[in-house]
Image (cartoon, coloured by chain):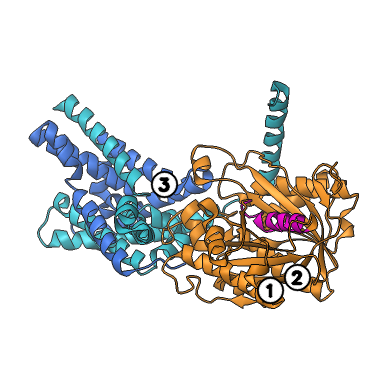
Amino acid sequence: MASPGAKKQKADDRAKYQKLASSIVPRPQLARNIAVAFVVGGLICALGQAVMNAFIASGMTGDEATAPTLATMILIGVVLTGLSVYHHIGEFAGAGAAVPITGFANTVAAAAMDFKREGYILGMGAKMFIIAGPVLVYGILAGVTVALIKWLSRG
Amino acid sequence: MEGSSLDYVIAFLVGGAICAVGQAVLDLTRISPAHMLVLFVVVGAVLSGFGVYDRLVDFAGAGALVPVSGFGHSIARGSLLEARRLGVIGLFTGAFEFTGLGVATAVFFSALIALVANPRA
Amino acid sequence: MATRRIGRSTVRFAAPPVIVSAGTVAGPMESRGPMARWFDEVVPDDMFGERSAEKAERRFMGDAVKIALTQAAVQPEQVDYFIAGDLLNQVITASFTAEDLGMPFIGVYGACSTSAQSLTVASALVDAGFADLALAATSSHYQTAERQFRYPIELNIQRKSTSQYTATGAGAVLVGRSGGKVKITEATVGRVIDMGTKDPNQMGPAMAPAAAETIFSHLADTGRDPGFYDVIITGDLGSVGSQILLELMQRRGVPLGDNYADGGVMLFQGVRGTGVGGSGCACSALIMDGFVWKRMCEGEIRRALIVATGALLSPLSWQQGESVPCIANAVTLQV
């Protein structure tokens, strides 16, 4: 195995190479990407507002309208995924498509469509939340913890 | 929320801004989209704890609720409201108070769509 | 005493085996690029009418093999070894194709360097007298690679400024003692090089040092300079990776000239949505078994160095935070 000196040499070589590589690797088109994410993400949220207003107009409170609004947006995301449209929006808009809840729906539907080839139980059933799973897990961990602290501190 | 056209403008601006921050995180760091989404859902829950996200929702409606940070907030808020009502049990059932409908919708319709649609490159 | 070795990494075949025939099958994206006219078969449906992308990939490899055999009017029973590999776990495309063919099978894995790797093994077996005919094949498929290494196909993902696009297709080469114009004269087997690149979106930058190392070793072992070759073609560095390679070779005092090109860039030049170029086993295979071999048969290219590059990562290794070990395997083709 490599001696300590050789190890140090290797680490130095790597650092030097990474410096060279990063000087050649093109920067992301930050301004373009952020602008597109802003507009597309904003439009999806405005659509969400329309859905929410419709539920509120039917007599719900803001709190009551939250769940059906999210569910409607999720349904839209799932359908657009099934039509093979959502990944194009994602390619174009990046976080503008990934951050809205429609993107969450896309991760579930895309995984379901993709993994069904490995069977409906161990494929689709087991892997449907392969991307969305962490969002649920950490959402619940963080949400419940936050609620617990707040509840205990103020009752 | 009264359903004026200003609602839409504010939802667009606030929702768009949250997504823009997400894009900046993706482009300026090396974290994967999955890590970014987890970061947002946790930040949403934490901001909810400080009462910040509630105010943002009052101000921007869907502009704050539709981004995945709003998902974290919805979990935290549901959990807190139900804990106050039911105690410890509510702390956990409340996690799905506002989000359960969405999660079940995602599962149900994703399975349905997977039956009829195939991935296309 | 190994009589065919010249230097640390290179072998020179005593009686250089020849390429008897070659078959290439390409998918729809590949057929939109400038290389399309060099492919034997172009398939408009990347699913090949199959139910899974993995099955489709097998069809690509199977067809490439069939074309090579038909061209040479050789029956499967006459082939002594089938040497093949692909990107999928347990090289299932190669193994399942081998089952269909019924030839003695050697499964190989060199990620995207498999084209040159399998050709090296085939040539060595023929040269050493273990075989009269050996068939080397490799394939890759956009959908199967995405599924295994990245994300579900329909997932919303934005390509990074360094992302490459996995080529869909396959190449097969029949190697024999005689009956072909193009000879395999030398082969340089690469060392595994890891310069610490961790980002799975930066395969070109990860592989460039391996390519530089193999080209450098090859030239040192053979005593040649880059100008000896009409073309030096790397497998799939993409535009960013090949730019880095040029810089690395410059710094090592062996600058590459106009005779250098990258297969990933050649394959998808001007094709929208392919990032900085093609990748995957099929990328170098389509260029080598299609474009290069046919140009050599026509006498337009006389000496070619094919440097197929491979990133030897797995989803497991990068999730565990490991950087990407890479390899480059080179073969010299001469008329």
- Marks 3/1 in contact by CB < 8 Å: the verdict is no
Color of chain C here?
orange
The residue carrying mark 3 is: B34
**Helix, strand or loop status at disc 2:** strand
Q: Nearer the viewer, mark 3 or mark 1?
A: 1
Q: Which chain carries label 3?
A: B
Image coordinates for residue A8, horizontal then vertical, percent: 70, 26
Looking at the rendered structure, the kind of residue marked 3 is: Ala
Q: Which mark is residue C256?
A: none
Q: Is residue B51 visible?
A: no
Quadrant placement of the N terminus of chain C: top right
Looking at the rendered structure, the kind of residue marked 1 is: Val
Tell me if C331 is positioned left or right of A153 in this view: right
Residue ID at (37%, 42%): B38
Q: Which of marks 3 and 2 is in front?
A: 2
- Are tags 3 and 1 found on a single chain? no
Question: In which quadrant of the rendered view does residue C101 lie?
Answer: bottom right
- Marks 1/2 in contact by CB < 8 Å: the verdict is yes
The residue carrying mark 1 is: C74
Q: Which chain carries label 2?
A: C
Q: Which of C146 and B21 is in front in this view?
A: C146
Q: Which chain is cyan?
A: A
Tally of numbered discs: 3
Is the residue marked by circle 1 packed among few (<14), some (14-19), or many (20+) residues within 10 Å? Answer: some
Looking at the rendered structure, the kind of residue marked 2 is: Val
Tell me if C203 is positioned left or right of C234 in this view: left
Mark 3 to mark 1 CA distance (whole Å): 51 Å
